[in-house]
Amino acid sequence: MKSLIIISALAFCSFGLAAQTVKEAEVPAATKSALIKIYPSAKVEKWEKEEGNYEAEFHNNKIETSVLISEGGTILETETEMKPDDLPKSIAEYVNKYLNGKKIKEASKIVYQKGKIGYEAEVDDIDYIFDENGTFVEKKAETDKDTDNNK
């Protein structure tokens, strides 16, 4: 029983390490400056620190957007919400075939640092990542679901 409690506590703590909400005052100036260069009117709703980088969440033209930026100000990734129906057809086919036709709850287009495109489809609180052709790449369990609901 003690082992189960310890394992549960460690698992809970590790979830907090994935993304931690930080105050804007804690975000390096170079990081904020990089965001303002590409989104001059962004009003950041939440800053998170993820593995030494910073993620800004905001709405751009009423579309949920997040930008992952290094401490030194390098844009690493931009994620823009989109309608699940606008995903490449092969992603819906993947969900139908491998996830028993479950519903895609949320979808995003991802633009990586060197311009490479990807897509994210959320099904049952798990993010399925696809490449620019809609080919499955990996899945990631969401770790900060509770904080997302507090927006």
Image: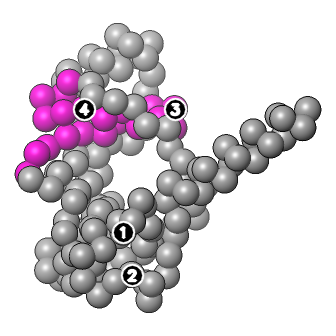
The numbered disc on residue 54 is: 1
Q: Secondary structure at mark 4?
A: strand
Against 114, is 73 above or below? below
Q: Secondary structure at mark 2?
A: loop
The numbered disc on residue 27 is: 2
For the point 91% across and 32% down, the residue is 1
For the point 50% across and 54% down, the residue is 18
Where residue 148 appears, as percent x and y from the top left, is 52, 58
Which of the two residues, 148 or 35, is positioned nearer the viewer here?
35
Report the amino acid beneath label 4: Phe
The magenta region covers 115-135
Where residue 123 appears, as percent x and y from the top left, is 45, 32
* Between discs 1 and 4, the one toward the N terminus: 1
* Between discs 1 and 3, the one toward the N terminus: 1
**How many residues crowd mark 2 within 10 Å: few (<14), some (14–19), many (20+)?**
some
* Between discs 3 and 2, the one toward the N terminus: 2
- Whether residue 36 is in magenta: the answer is no
